[in-house]
Structure formats: C-alpha cells, structure tokens
Image (cartoon, rainbow, N blue to C red):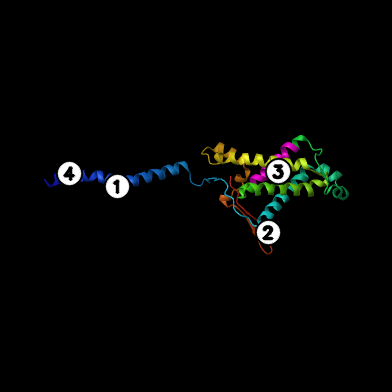
Amino acid sequence: MRRKQCHKFLILLLPLILEAAAPCLADTEKKEEALVSEPQGRTRYEPVKPRSHEFIESFQYVSYIYAATVPLYLAMNNKEVFSNASFNLYFSNFGNMTFFDQDLPTANWILHVVTGSLAFEFYRSRSYDLTDAFILTLIQECLFQFTLETLIQPTALENVANTTILGTILGRGLELSSLPLLNSGTLIFRGLGYVLNPSAAFGFWENQVKLVPMVGTKTAGLSLKVNF
C-alpha cells in the first residue's frame, strides 16, 4: 500500500517538476542553436558606430595611405616619371589646375573611382562617420594630386571629383552590400564580402581592434593582425 501511495504522489508531482524544468530546457536549446548558427571563432561584422578621433590618429592614417600610394604610382607610371619628370616640370605643375587631363578614360573613370571607394571604406572601417570619411578621402586625393601627380602633369579637377564624390558613393554602396555577405554562413558569400570590402579582410574593421597606431618618443608604426 505504501508503494502505491508513493507512486501516486510522484505522478502528481511530475507535472510540477516538468513545468519547473521547462525554462532550463528552453535555455539549453537556445544555447545549442546559437552555437550552431554562430560557429566559434567567427567574427560578426556590425554596422559602423562612429566615434571621435584625435588629430594625430587621422594624420597617421592619411600619411600611411599616402606612403603606400607613392611606390604604386611610380611603378605604374615609371616610364613617364623617370623619362620626363624634372624639378622644373614639377614646380611648373605645382599649384596649377586643369579640368581634364590626358589620362585614359579607364584611369579617370575606373581606377580613380575604385581607389576613392577603397579609401572611403578604410576610413569607415576605422569608425569615421560618413562626412569625416568623405573629407579624409578628399584630403587623401588632394595630397596625391598636388604633390605626387604633379611630377608629370598639372592637377586635374576631374580626378579629384571622380575619386572623392563617385568613390564615396561607390564605397558606401559596397559597404552596405558587404555586411550581409560577411555575416553569411556560406564561405563563398563571405569571400565575396571581403572582395567588396577589403578593409574587413585585412583586419581594419573597428570592432575587431586589430589595427592600432603605435607612437612613442623614438618609434612610430602600426600593430597589425591580418584576418583571412
């Protein structure tokens, strides 16, 4: 008799036990779903959250990109630069402006627009707002045009407009298009996202904190961690 009463008592308590355990089971299922949907080690790319920047930080970024463009420009235009460039030509071109230059349409309407979009995406990845990213892209292009391209020709306003205005429009579109792809669970889509937004591929995205300027009394440089 006592065993039957114990069994009846346990049967009555069973619904209460299940009801109390239900939240725990639900949390476990949610955690398991989260682990499946977000594999360990994968970075999630959040939309840019603008922050304030010190002048020295922006100055360093502009300087580093400028330093990187100098050898590229010399390599692409080595014949013109090393055959025709001179101090007299440089100083005659310096400060002079023209609306159009003699470059090929592919250079003016493709190369300049793409480079402008890359610069804009870089500054966005470092948490600059849309206006500041545009201004820094403009500064970057003016610095290039008025100090480097004057080796062989005057500054072309067409190039400045294409790089900054069209480049910003393209860069903004690529940024918005890349985020869903970068957060995709499909490898080929994530790869396409890196193609559209190379700053994410090289660890420049702010929420990863992988690019840190290093400035000291006798040192200056970057701490960089590359993520592919």
Task: Give the spatial CA distance, label 1 vs label 2.
Answer: 60 Å
Give the x, y percent position of residue 101.
81, 39
Q: Amino acid at mark 1?
A: Ala
Q: Mark 3: which secondary structure?
A: helix
Residue that label 2 marks: 220
Task: Give the spatial CA distance, label 3 vs label 2.
Answer: 28 Å
Which tag is nearer the camera, tag 1 or tag 3?
Answer: 3
Q: Amino acid at mark 3?
A: Thr
Q: Amino acid at mark 4?
A: Lys
Q: Amino acid at mark 2?
A: Ala
Q: Mark 2: which secondary structure?
A: strand
Residue that label 1 marks: 20
Tell me if mark 1 has few (under 14), some (14-19) or many (20+) residues whose alpha carbon lies within 10 angstroms of its own: few
- Report the residue at 31% width, 46% height from top: 21
Give the x, y percent position of residue 17.
26, 46
Tell me if mark 4 has few (under 14), some (14-19) or many (20+) residues whose alpha carbon lies within 10 angstroms of its own: few
- Report the residue at 67% width, 43% height from top: 118
Residue 164 — which label?
Answer: 3
- Determine the image quadrant of residue 152: top right
Residue that label 4 marks: 8
Marks 1,2: beta carbons within 8 A: no
Main secondary structure found in the magenta portion: helix
Which circle's residue, 3 or 2, is located before the other in the chain?
Answer: 3
